[in-house]
Image (spheres, grey):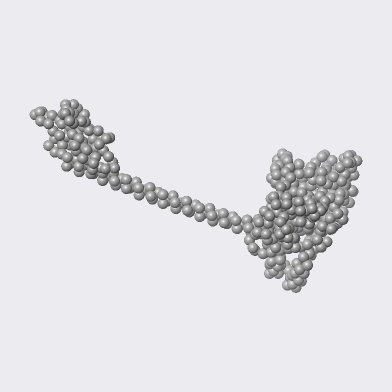
């Protein structure tokens, strides 16, 4: 280059630049087209400024369209611009590679996260299936035999006892009847006698009709509470003339038989949503049942019942005083026309027991106490309580001490939600058909 001016260093170098006729100042924005660099280069080469030197000679200057460099040789300018283009191309290519790599990493991370979520969901689903007996691990019979075999292996049961009880089990299952090994009878009668003589802090107590207690065995431990509560309720219905015609076989069925009865109710069309939940199969499973299955089975047997949902606490500290009031009203309907001051201390009603359901367990309400200070206390049969404990209530010298296993005050019922199934008469065939249609979408009475 014979002559070069760098305007970045000396802005005054072009103070004497003149514009000959036919030429204009170079417009960087208009002359450089990134989509066609060569065209821009030609434009840049043809855009000139003439500078007068001290000898009054004019020198042609060439501007770089991508920076502020000015030179007097077009070849050098072309090489300079090509370097710009190469640099920009490499930078764009690197950015493109980086973006593709980032997208790949993000996609891999999303796929890994989705796989982990699916794995976690599948594991949780398997746990729920196992917890609620829907994992095809066998039912009452299989569990009963397995537990007896374990007892023999641990030396807790002799082989002769194992074979004897296995034969009894097979006979019971073949007949479809409970073997009665877990039944405790006469409890309501014993409570009636106790409250007459003792419990001076109790103003009134309402008791249901005579009800037997059934507890879980090796065959249904951990999942059979709903079936055992149905046996308790059925034991009361069998003793009441009003319901005898509705109860099949006039005997207490075993758990596999109850499962078959619920399946029969589903086949007839009761509670299709519940049937779908269990894939229409309960036999040979350890599936839990709840209030809706209890309601469907009772309606199938032409027994009028109602589901009442106490869906939220109605008292301080998460308690349910409305539930206690509802139970008292249910048991006191037979004596509703009598003022409290004229009521006897112990009221033996003809009302059946009440099925009580909450998260993870179910029990049977057999009565309610009202203390002298107005406090209320439910009397509850728990299928988890073994027979040898319940039998203490039959002895006058131990009934008072053992009564604590039945009593449940408001502070002892603090689950968020409770459901009850209460029996209230029988159904005609026409009414049963109406209930069948209504059961397609079951709706509980909500309190409050």
> Residue drawn at (71%, 59%), measured in percent from left and top?
267
User: Quadrant of the image for the C terminus?
Assistant: top right
Taking 382 as reference, is 103 left or right?
left
Q: Position of residue 239 (x, y in %)?
A: 86, 56
Tell me the residue at 70%/43% (across/down).
312
- The residue lying furthest to the top in this view is 15
Observer-nearest of 222 and 210? 210
Residue 314, quarter of picture: top right
Which residue is at the front of the view, 211 or 346? 211
Looking at the image, how many numbered discs can be counted on the residues? Answer: 0
Residue occupying image coordinates x 17% and y 42%: 75
Residue 168 figure quarter: bottom right
Which residue is located at x 20 percent, y 30 percent?
24
Task: Give residue 241's quadrant in the image.
Answer: bottom right
Q: Is residue 346 left or right of residue 282?
A: right
**Compared with residue 404, is residue 261 higher up or lower down, i.e. above or below?**
below
x and y percentages locating residue 162 in the rendered image: 74, 70
Q: Is residue 376 visible?
A: yes
Quadrant (top left/top right/bottom left/bottom right) for the N terminus: top left
Residue 218, visible in the rendered structure: no
175 versus 396 height, above or below: below
The reply, left or right, for residue 358 in relation to residue 100 is right
Which of the two residues, 281 or 320, is positioned nearer the viewer here?
A: 281
The foreground one among 316 and 137 is: 137
Q: Residue furthest left?
A: 55
Residue 439, percent from left and from top: 72, 51
């Amino acid at each position: 280059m014979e002559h070069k001016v760098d305007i970045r260093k000396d802005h005054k170098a072009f103070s004497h630049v003149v514009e000959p006729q036919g030429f204009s100042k170079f417009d960087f924005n208009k002359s450089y087209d990134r989509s066609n660099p060569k065209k821009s280069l030609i434009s840049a080469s043809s855009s000139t400024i003439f500078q007068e030197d001290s000898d009054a000679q004019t020198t042609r200057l060439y501007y770089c369209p991508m920076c502020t460099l000015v030179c007097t040789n077009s070849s050098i300018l072309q090489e300079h611009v090509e370097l710009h283009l190469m640099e920009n191309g490499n930078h764009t290519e690197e950015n493109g590679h980086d973006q593709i790599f980032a997208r790949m990493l993000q996609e891999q991370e999303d796929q890994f996260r989705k796989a982990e979520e699916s794995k976690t969901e599948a594991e949780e689903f398997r746990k729920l299936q196992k917890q609620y007996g829907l994992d095809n691990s066998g039912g009452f019979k299989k569990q009963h035999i397995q537990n007896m075999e374990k007892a023999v292996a641990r030396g807790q049961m002799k082989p002769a006892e194992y074979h004897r009880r296995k034969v009894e089990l097979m006979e019971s299952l073949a007949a479809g009847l409970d073997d009665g090994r877990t039944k405790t009878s006469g409890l309501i009668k014993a409570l009636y006698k106790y409250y007459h003589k003792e419990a001076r802090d109790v103003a009134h107590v309402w008791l249901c009709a005579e009800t037997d207690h059934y507890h879980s065995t090796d065959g249904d431990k951990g999942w059979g509470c709903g079936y055992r509560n149905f046996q308790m309720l059925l034991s009361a219905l069998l003793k009441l003339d009003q319901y005898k015609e509705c109860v099949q076989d006039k005997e207490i069925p075993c758990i596999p038989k109850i499962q078959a009865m619920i399946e029969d109710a589903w086949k007839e069309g009761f509670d299709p949503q519940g049937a779908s939940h269990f894939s229409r199969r309960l036999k040979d499973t350890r599936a839990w049942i709840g209030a809706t299955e209890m309601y469907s089975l009772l309606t199938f047997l032409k027994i009028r019942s109602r589901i009442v949902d106490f869906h939220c606490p109605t008292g301080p500290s998460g308690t349910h005083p409305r539930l206690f009031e509802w139970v008292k009203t249910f048991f006191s309907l037979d004596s509703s026309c009598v003022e409290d001051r004229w009521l006897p201390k112990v009221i033996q009603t003809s009302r059946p027991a009440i099925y009580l359901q909450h998260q993870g367990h179910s029990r049977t309400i057999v009565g309610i106490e009202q203390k002298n200070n107005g406090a209320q206390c439910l009397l509850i049969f728990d299928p988890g309580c073994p027979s040898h404990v319940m039998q203490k209530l039959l002895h006058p010298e131990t009934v008072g001490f053992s009564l604590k296993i039945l009593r449940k005050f408001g502070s002892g019922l603090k689950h968020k939600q409770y459901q009850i199934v209460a029996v209230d008469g029988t159904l005609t065939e026409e009414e049963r058909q109406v209930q069948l249609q209504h059961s397609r979408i079951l709706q509980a009475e909500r309190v409050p």
